Image (tube, rainbow, N blue to C red):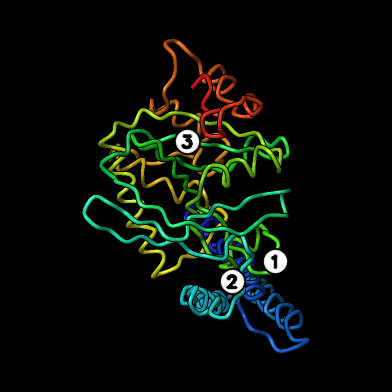
């Protein structure tokens, strides 16, 4: 019986080393500055060593598994010490993510610099324009949640927030992948510190209209149940967090540090007991999660499918009102 138990532990340990070895191959591929023509031979050699040591481990050579562990730990150590400042010091960013916003405070008034306000002619044709806006945090009254789906995908979406003020201002926030020039986003590369996480502060005619009118995404806009006091707390903490990211940029990660998970701390600012939910990772269902938590405003007895059907912003684009007013029809 003890031999069987030992065998289970051994093979679980070897499986863990195999999975870690596969991850390390990706880390070597994406984060090591290889000399010309050495990348793929080097990765092949590393993979061969992993397989060789695993075979020895299967045959009972525990020294080989220890050697493999040390080898993998060296790669992990290299990966953990990489910083955005080191990797992106001379990077030229694509225009939509060219500027990082920052905020200056004067009491309850916050002046937001580099508010994106592009004018689009198509998805890839636009006039680059940034604004400086001053808001009074004491005047924030509502928080709206936007969830945008593309290519008919239900399980994947992009989540955004709008803070609404009593003076009529709408300020939209989005956590996005900051892409270097000539680079397309890749989910696997996004696991290996290849992009920065960029907070975008923008007008709704930039952030939302780009998606509804030009990318033809399906955008759902919900009013949250956050009180004015909760909305102010969320806004203040978010602005201070953005200033922290301005001074200390963070990596984007496809799973752990994306558009939805980066906004998740705000759920704990409202409800400290919130412990997380898988729907923060499968972010196309993040609006359903907030409905289940009671955070979305809805009619009495209204089911989530009924609420979602009513709050599809694309249904209201042809109205004569300005864009922010039109997409809040039947809110």
Residue 296 falls left or right of residue 58: left
Between discs 3 and 1, the one toward the N terminus: 3
Between discs 3 and 2, the one toward the N terminus: 2
Q: Say if 193 sits above or below 275 in the image.
A: below
| Location of mark 1 (residue) | 183
Task: Determine the image quadrant of residue 232.
Answer: top left
Element assignment for label 3: strand
Element assignment for label 2: loop
Please identify, in this view, whether the residue under mark 1 or under mark 2 is nearer the observer: 1
Q: Do the CB atoms of the residues marked 3 and 1 lie less than 8 Å apart?
A: no
Q: Position of residue 3 (x, y in %)?
A: 51, 58
| Residue in front for this viewpoint, 122 or 322 | 322
Residue that protrudes farthest toward the left in the picture: 107
Residue that protrudes farthest toward the top in the picture: 301
> Which residue is found at the position 60% from the left and 71% from the top?
24
Which label sits on residue 60?
A: 2
Which label sits on residue 145?
A: 3
- Sort mark 3 into few (<14), some (14-19) or many (20+) by Cα contacts within 10 Å: many
Please indicate, yes or no, whether residue 330 appears anywhere in the rendered image: yes
Between discs 1 and 2, the one toward the N terminus: 2
Please identify, in this view, whether the residue under mark 3 or under mark 2 is nearer the observer: 3
Please indicate, yes or no, whether residue 4 appears anywhere in the rendered image: no
Q: Position of residue 160 (x, y in %)?
A: 50, 43
């Amino acid at each position: 019986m003890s031999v069987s138990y030992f065998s289970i532990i051994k093979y679980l340990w070897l499986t863990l080393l195999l999975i870690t070895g596969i991850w390390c191959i990706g880390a070597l591929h994406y984060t090591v500055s290889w000399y010309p023509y050495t990348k793929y031979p080097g990765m092949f050699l590393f993979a061969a060593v992993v397989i060789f040591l695993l075979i020895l481990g299967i045959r009972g050579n525990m020294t080989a598994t220890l050697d493999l562990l040390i080898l993998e730990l060296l790669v992990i150590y290299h990966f953990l010490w990489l910083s955005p400042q080191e990797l992106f010091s001379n990077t030229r960013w694509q225009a939509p993510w060219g500027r990082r916003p920052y905020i200056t405070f004067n009491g309850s008034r916050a002046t937001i610099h580099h508010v994106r306000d592009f004018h689009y002619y198509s998805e890839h044709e636009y006039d680059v324009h940034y604004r400086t806006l001053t808001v009074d945090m004491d005047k924030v009254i509502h928080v709206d949640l936007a969830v945008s789906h593309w290519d008919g995908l239900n399980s994947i979406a992009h989540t955004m927030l709008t803070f609404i003020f009593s003076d009529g201002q709408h300020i939209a926030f989005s956590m996005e992948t900051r892409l270097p020039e000539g680079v397309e986003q890749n989910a696997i590369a996004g696991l290996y510190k290849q992009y920065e996480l960029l907070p975008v502060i923008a007008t709704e005619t930039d952030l939302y209209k780009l998606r509804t009118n030009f990318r033809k995404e399906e955008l759902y806009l919900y009013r949250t149940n956050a009180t004015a006091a909760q909305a102010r707390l969320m806004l203040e903490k978010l602005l201070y967090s953005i200033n922290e990211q301005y001074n200390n940029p963070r990596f984007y990660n496809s799973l752990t540090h994306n558009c939805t998970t980066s906004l998740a701390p705000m759920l704990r600012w409202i409800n400290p007991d919130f412990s997380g939910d898988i729907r923060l990772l499968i972010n196309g269902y993040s609006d359903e999660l907030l409905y289940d938590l009671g955070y979305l405003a809805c009619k009495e007895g209204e089911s989530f499918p009924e609420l979602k059907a009513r709050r599809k912003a694309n249904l209201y684009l042809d109205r004569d009102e300005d864009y922010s007013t039109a997409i809040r029809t039947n809110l």
